[in-house]
Image (tube, helix red, strand yellow):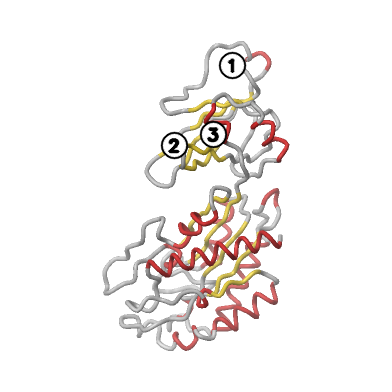
Amino acid sequence: MSGSAQLGLHERRPGPPRVDVALSRVRDQDRDRKDTPPWGPGFVRVTAVPTLPPRTMIIALRGDRTCRIRTLAPLRFQAQAAIRISRRVRGRVRDGRTRCQSARRIVRSVKTVLCYGDSNTWGCIPLTGPEPSRRFAPNERWPGVLREHLGAEYWVVEEGLNGRTTVWEDGLQPHRNGRELLLPALLSHRPVDIAILMLGTNDLKRRIGVSAAEIAEGAGMLVEIARGSCCGLDGAEPEVLLVCPPPLGRLPQFAHAFEGGAEKSRELAAAFTEVARERGCALLHAGTHISTSDVDGVHLDRDAHAALGAAVAEAVRNLEGNG
């Protein structure tokens, strides 16, 4: 065994391609040992520089597939997931400290994007009746489209939950208060570089009984929670992109549940604009790019998911450019 660290890489299926990494620092007394970690079939071994910082994330490119590295238990060198690697370190790795040709194309920066929302982030297919909810495929949901548009330098995390509100309790659907679940989500996926918040549609329900201004203020509270979480890189605050949901459409089966909601939904754009201005955060009006499905008036169809993912990707790039 030679070098300062050993990385074992392999792909996992099904789902988005990932890789696992076994990372251990080689102590002086271990350098001449003949035994090696149990890499297993499909592993690629690569020697990394000794100065990889904590929370290292590496992207391995295999052909046209992108794999994400998640660290496992180290011996002495702690490397938890997802920090940007300095250009100096990336250059040294590219200059020949890798063990195989396929690993020479490995190292690049990765930023984590958290998409926090409701059934439209979950990817609920528009409902035609009281049937159980079904969701679009991962690459069809707007976070998946966002992932494709942003490319390998971003890791997009989906945190969508049917019925989730901004900050309000729903007596008929418990555990849907977005204020209670946002911080655990940020802590679970930290470091989070960008938090995308798209909530407010379920707040329009008659039984919630709040105004458009109150819905926007609830979204503003989520902005404050995200910024105060210290879940960004090295304990910094994440960037926040607030997304105002599109207005409700025709409600063939949700007319009672959302009674009066269509009118309020058309007031959200102005209310969200004011909240974003007060908090100084980026804002995207989803209704500028998409509309809800004519099937149920609440959820997005496949084309709307594609358009929203592209619009969010552009907003993220603009946010990064201004950072």
Structural distance between the alpha carbons of marks 1 and 3: 19 Å
Task: Report the disc number at residue 11.
Answer: 2
Where's residue 239, x and y in %?
65, 61
* 283 or 275: nearer the viewer: 283
Q: Viewer-nearest of labels 1 and 3?
A: 1
- Name the residue tied to disc 3: 72
Q: Name the residue under label 1.
A: 1
Going 60% across and 62% down the picture, which residue do you hit?
A: 316
Q: State which tag comes first along the sequence, 2 or 3.
A: 2
Image vertical order of residue 64 relative to residue 47, above or below:
below
* Quarter of the picture holding the N terminus: top right
Disc on the earlier residue, 1 or 3: 1
Q: Quadrant of the C terminus?
A: bottom right
Provide residue 139's location: percent of width, then percent of height: 41, 56
Q: Front-most of 204 and 145?
A: 145
| Residue 13 percent coordinates (x, y) | 38, 41
Name the quadrant containing residue 223: bottom right
Between the residue at mark 2 and the residue at mark 3, the CA separation in whole angstroms equals: 15 Å
Residue extending furthest toward the right: 88
User: Relative to residue 132, is residue 247 depicted above or below?
Assistant: below
Q: Quadrant of residue 106?
A: top right
Q: Earlier in the sequence, mark 1 or mark 2?
A: 1
Tell which tag, 2 or 3, sits nearer the viewer. 2
Q: Residue at x 55, y 36 (%)?
A: 71
Residue kind at label 3, given as amino acid type:
Leu
